[in-house]
Each structure stands twice: as C-alpha cells, then as structure tokens.
Image: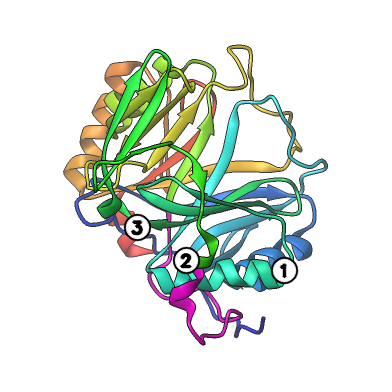
C-alpha cells in the first residue's frame, strides 16, 4: 500500500455521539519500530508521521490513533494483566469490507467474528499485540440475557444468537464492490474500545463505572467478562476480563504491549468531576501536562486529557 506521509496533529478524538467518554491514542511499546510502522501503515492502512516525544503516531484525519514507542526487548506475553486487544472502528460497511479484503489478499491470519452488535476481525501485530477491526452494527442488536450457565444475545428480529459467532465473510465483503482493497483507512476511523485483562472483575467494573464514568452494560460472570458503554447507544466502549486469574500482574518492564491509553471527556465540568471521584476513591493520580495520569486496580495506565488541553494542542 502506498500512503503519503503527513504531519499528524496531537489533537484527540472527540467523544462519539451520545457518549460521555471517548478515546485519544493508544500507546504501544514495540520491539522493532520500523517493522511495527510497516504493519500499521501498509497492512492496516493508517497514515504515519513523527509526533512530539519519543513516539511515532499513526492515524487518520490528522489524529494519531496508535502511537508506537520503540524499546521493548521481548514480545507480548501471556498470563498478565494489561491489554487484551485494542479496537479500531471503521466508519461504514465499505471501509470494513476494504480492510477485511486487504487482510485476505495479504494472507494475514485473522479471525472474522460476528458479535451481533458489531462485526469484527482479529489479528496480531508483529509483537503479538492483538488488534480488533470493528464495524459497529447496534441496529442488529436487541438485548442480552445473562444466566449462571451462559450468555444469549437476541438480534433485532428476536432470534437467539451466541455472543461470538463466525462472521459471514462473503456477505461482509459485498460492500467493497469493485473498490480497491489497498486504499488507506478512511476519514472517520477511530479507536472505539479497548479490552483489558484485570485481576478482579467486580473491582474493575466498579472502578470504570463509579470512578472513571463508564456505564455498566453487562457483567457476564459465566464468561469472566464485562462490557461497559460510554452512555451512548453502542454497548462496548470498554471490555474487561479476569481470564488470567487473580494473581495476574503487569508484564515485566521491557515487554511489548500497552504503555497507556488516552481517554477524553466531553467537557471541563466532567473532567473536574472525574478528578473529584479519583480523590474520593483514594486513587493516586498526577496532573501531568497532558492531563490526569493514573492506573486502574490492575495497574493498567490511563491518561484522561482535559478538554481545554486536548483542544489547545
């Protein structure tokens, strides 16, 4: 794929319609910067440029979605608290079909999946960091039913569905038509959610709901997983799981993975309210130049940018 490098501003994504929380960039530590840039630029289709600091930003619309930092000495491992996957959301069915086709042409191993409220495919970067490419389809979703033995989804027609099904790839490729699968990611592509490994599901849900400000959607204890929305129509703005057990800790320094995730809030009153909630909960934080810096109970690092700071950069 050929893309024209362009300077990326350090302004950050606004919240999605109806959401009170959005995402800026997800920062990743990698072992080989050139190799990772090639993955995110040439295969995934983001545009790359140097940004301030020691990171290289890749994104669309003049916004970095992923920022790569070289210096990791080992690839991503298993059994730790931390990032399970980062999800880049496509703006429409044609864009999703384009990137799906591009991965097929490249013979890239992937796992196309239907979650009813979204269509997705999963793959790994060169360091083993998982990426989800997502098309939101909330219009296909009606409700979720959670019982001690499992989770059942109901689609818009009232049919019982599994929470994870194989994607109909042939149907998903139809919107591409005669389009070129090698074009870059289009305007409107954004980081739509992250999925994190945590030690204690209930503690993590309480933290992201009561302190950070996400809205609880579904706690699926039979799966050891929870979904939280940002208050809007899409139910899956952050996902949490305890699959690595209560002893899971952050990976050793030098391991490829998430350095931190940036969140944005809708306005300065909500930023101040979040600060007050951190204080009330006894959460240690720093007010750094880029915003509030703190960690969740599992040690996953977060930066929440003040709206005034994000707009001024």
* Residue carrying label 3: 310
**Residue 124's x, y, as percent?**
68, 50
The residue nearer to you, when weighing 268 against 237, is 237
Q: Select label 1 or label 2 by which is in front.
A: 2
Quadrant of the rendered structure where residue 103 is? bottom right
Horizontal relation, residue 2 to residue 18: left or right:
right
Mark 1: few, some, or many residues within 10 Å (few <14, many ≥20)?
Answer: some
* Mark linked to residue 38: 1
Q: Which comes sooner in the sequence, label 1 or label 3?
A: 1
Magenta span of residues: 171-191
Residue 24 lies in the magenta-colored region = no
Expressed as whole percent of the image width and height from the top left, the position of residue 212 reads 32, 32
Residue on which disc 2 sits: 171
- Check contact, mark 1 vs mark 2: CB within 8 A: no
Question: Residue at (58%, 37%) from the top-left corner?
Answer: 84
In what quadrant of the picture does the N terminus appear? bottom right
Q: Secondary structure at mark 3?
A: helix
The mark total stands at 3
């Amino acid at each position: 794929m050929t893309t024209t490098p362009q300077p990326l501003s350090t302004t950050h994504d606004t919240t999605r319609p109806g959401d009170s929380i959005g995402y800026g960039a997800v920062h990743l530590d990698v072992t080989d910067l050139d190799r990772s840039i090639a993955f995110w630029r040439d295969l995934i289709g983001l545009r790359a440029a140097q940004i301030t600091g020691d990171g290289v930003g890749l994104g669309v619309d003049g916004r970095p979605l992923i920022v790569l930092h070289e210096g990791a000495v080992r690839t991503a491992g298993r059994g730790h608290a931390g990032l399970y996957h980062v999800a880049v959301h496509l703006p429409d069915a044609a864009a999703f079909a384009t990137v799906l086709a591009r991965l097929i042409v490249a013979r890239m191993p992937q796992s196309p999946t239907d979650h009813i409220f979204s269509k997705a495919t999963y793959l790994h970067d060169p360091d083993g960091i998982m990426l989800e490419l997502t098309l939101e389809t909330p219009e296909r979703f009606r409700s979720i039913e959670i019982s001690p033995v499992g989770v059942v989804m109901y689609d818009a027609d009232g049919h019982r569905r599994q929470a994870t099904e194989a994607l109909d790839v042939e149907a998903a490729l139809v919107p591409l038509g005669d389009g070129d699968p090698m074009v870059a990611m289009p305007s409107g592509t954004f980081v739509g959610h992250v999925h994190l490994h945590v030690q204690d599901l209930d503690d993590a849900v309480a933290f992201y709901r009561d302190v950070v400000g996400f809205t609880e959607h579904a706690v699926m204890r039979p799966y050891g997983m929870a979904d939280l929305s940002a208050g809007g129509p899409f139910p899956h703005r952050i996902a949490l799981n305890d699959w690595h057990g209560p002893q899971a800790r952050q990976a050793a320094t030098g391991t490829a993975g998430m350095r931190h995730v940036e969140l944005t809030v809708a306005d300065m009153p909500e930023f101040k309210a979040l600060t007050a909630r951190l204080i009330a909960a006894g959460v240690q934080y720093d007010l750094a130049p880029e915003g509030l810096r703190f960690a969740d109970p599992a040690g996953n690092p977060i930066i929440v940018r003040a709206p005034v700071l994000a707009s001024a950069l």
